[in-house]
Amino acid sequence: MFRYLIRRLLAAAVILVVISMVTFFIFFALPNDPALLACGKTCSPNRLLEIRHSLGLDKSLAMQYWEFFKGLFIGRNYGDQSVSIHCSAPCLGMSFQTDTPVMTTLLGAFPADLSLALGSAVIFLILGVGLGVIAAIRKGRFADKFAVGAALFGVSLQSYFVGLILMWALVDKWNLLPSPNYTSLTDDPGQWFTGLILPWVTLVVLYLALYTRLTRSSMLEVMGEDYIRTARAKGLSSRTVIFKHGLRAAITPIVTIFGMDFGALIGGSAVITESVFGINGIGKLAVDSVTNSDEPVILGTTLFAAAFIVLANVVVDLVYGLIDPRVRLS
Amino acid sequence: MMRRTRTAAITATAIALALGATACGGSSGGSGGKATKGGTLTILNKADYDHLDPQRTYTTEGSSMDTEIVRALTGWDESTSTPKLVGDLATNTGTPTKNDTVWTFHLRAGVKFQDGTTVTSQDVKYGVERAFSADINGGPPYASQWLIGGSKYKGPYTGKSLDSIQTPDASTIVFNLDQPVADFNETTAMPGWSAVPKAHDTGATYDTHVWSDGPYMMKSYTKNKELVLVRNPYWSQKTDPLRQQNVNEMDVKFGMDEAAIDNLLKSDSGSAQTSIQQWPIAGSDLAGINGDKALASRYYKIPAPGINYLTLNVNRIKDIRVRKAIEYAIDKTAVRGAFGGEAYGAYATTMLNPGMGGYKQYNEYSSNPAGDVTKAKALMSQAGNPKLTLSVAVENTPTQEHAGDAIANSLARIGIKVNVSPIDASTYFSTLDNTKNQYDMAWMDWIADWPNASTVLPVLFDGRQIKANPLSNQDISYLNDPAINSGFDKAAKMTDINTRNAAYGALDQQILSQASVVPLMYMSFTELSGSKVGGVINDPILAEPSLAHVFLKS
């Protein structure tokens, strides 16, 4: 088990290095010149050269990547004049746009995504699996049709549509909720909760269908297995059959999908929800950085999201061993 | 000033379709009433400022916010209907000598930084010098263009100072220019011409550490999240002719969706009553807000010193008769419809806006904004009815693509086929400003840096920049007429304001007679505030709601 973990983590590190290289070189294949954007409206060729130098863009690509890589472990200094800025290890670089270390920006945006992901995941997982189980054991009856239908309706809506409708109705029109906003949990737990209700609901509407349908089909398959029939024949209560024998086996594929969804959510995949509600998370940061040709932030957000997805997969594999006795890690 | 375009996001379109007109409570507002003290003003912006470092900001939003934090040498008194240039940090609007090449300013006594130290002329010199450093990038180019030795100077971080800025004593500053600049004191109203104390300069991170000598100072600033401004205890009303210090705090929140901001302000619910926006209302929300009488008292429609126009590349469309035919054929009513209709601004026939120094009213082409197809067809037949296919560059936003279609439909009426080329909005200007671009026509807009023809016509039509700045050429028409170029040189040297304005007015008409550009609309920008926000002034220089006198009604 320990050796397995080490091996998985090493592989994850290699994947991250490859992703960082691909992102780095793809960015430079784009026709954008960050120095020209920084230079402003009327830019003389001389001034442009100076700004390229100041941003470190006058060095070769390989050299630039090497400096980035080195910075991860030993930190970097920016600017060679009297007012230079230090970016301490692990340094993901310095934003061209805001002149702040990318790591600081990412860590600033991260709690918002974590709150968004955790809150919504708790709701859509409980509701989704619950509805899925009900739909499976009442297959073909009203409860099944209703659960599947409602979930499908939800997934067909786009988050900007759901988000703006909810906001208009609950905030602008009836004043039931304050305007959504991210407040840190440690600053004010009450505001943290009320400010996130709408973003959570929006995400739940989007994810619920997937988990309902996944649980339903997985449960249907498991409930048709011989050992379930045996369990029933033994005279076990239907509750024990459904939850202990059925759901425990059926949940494995759901955990896999959930691991990836959750990793992606933390990594900023809820970008539209973030921007509708003005939550400054990693997703919004990523989109803005592409618009602004802010290469260090593009690289940072990509790596950050990738790291969570890779990590979530490792965790999922470990969890398999715990929930499914048939799986043994070696 | 940085072009600021009104683009409708997907979300904005969605909400407009979904909701139509939303009902909202009546407001009892208006900008009038007596100023009261206290309270927190919330500012809701879809994005963060480009910069608040006074030497780096070059957008209308950033410059407007900087006005509350730093004081430039001169400023615009906008308490009356026509803005008037006055001394801000300086006692007056400066004294030009030696044929407008030497400008002297005396600083007001008693102006203090947020730590109580007195603002000196050395601080202003240091501030202006910062803009020459490559680390302090993004700002306007005027200091390096005009100050003697400016093209070689690399900023104060090298340990050197610029000799053409002299400080004979702690309250006097003298600028030595390499050419006569009659409106230099209008340049010095931009935020970069302000004081930065060397001890508090943090270089490239000064954006979040601006040291205040204005009524408000930074309490906290997290980029792309939130800026909190509080009262500067050392600011004194007696030394400041332009600003007031009414609210206790200004809390700027960044990153909310623009349609969500518009709807929140429209609803006037809860904290929205004490909120205002600095980015304009989204194009798709504008039509519903513009005509709403209930909103009129807190709706600010501000005429901008800006122009929305179509360039005709004279190197690619060589026959002037064809270019004139295009001038007659464009249906400006359809183009304006794409940009939001009447609320967007009036039809333009000149490149200079009414109200701008040098504006001359004339119309070289069709008197009907929908175009004059008969006249256009006649010009095309004079040109031998060439079979033409032309490209027009627009930003890849719904608004602009509709405008592109309107242009294509207009020119189809005279047998010109037009291919609309949408370009990614984030790289639009850098693509078009690059002289390698291959477009026959291009949509453009421009906001003047100060309300004078000198920041419009030479910037956009002096053809000598095509060679000098091949990557940031603003002459998208590629007009390079020696007579017009020397006209700019002559006008710049004129010291009598009336003669100079007349010269620019004539140049405007000369440029239009070359049919190198189709002026489309004079722009105006629109914002909303909550019903408890008072004292907002329409600032036609920056096209922003000025917060200089803002207060909250109790």
Image (tube, rainbow, N blue to C red):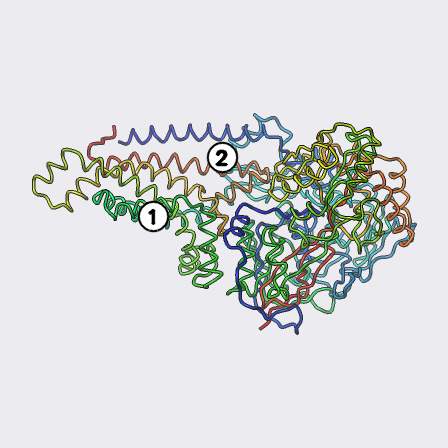
In the image, residue B507 lies at what x, y percent? 87, 44
Q: Which mark is residue A150?
A: 1
Name the subunit of mark 1: A
Circle 2: residue type: Leu
> For residue B139, what is the image quadrant?
top right
Decide: is A99 above or below B303.
above
Quadrant for the C terminus of chain A in the image: top left
In the image, residue B273 lies at what x, y percent? 55, 65
Q: Which residue is mark 2?
A: A72
Q: How many marks?
A: 2
Decide: is A6 above or below A168.
above
Q: Which mark is residue A58?
A: none
Decide: is A8 above or below B407.
above
Quadrant for the N terminus of chain A in the image: top left
In the image, residue B377 lies at what x, y percent? 79, 36
Q: Nearer the viewer, residue B481 or B100?
A: B481
Decide: is A21 above or below A198.
above
Task: State whether discs 1 and 2 lie on one chain.
Answer: yes
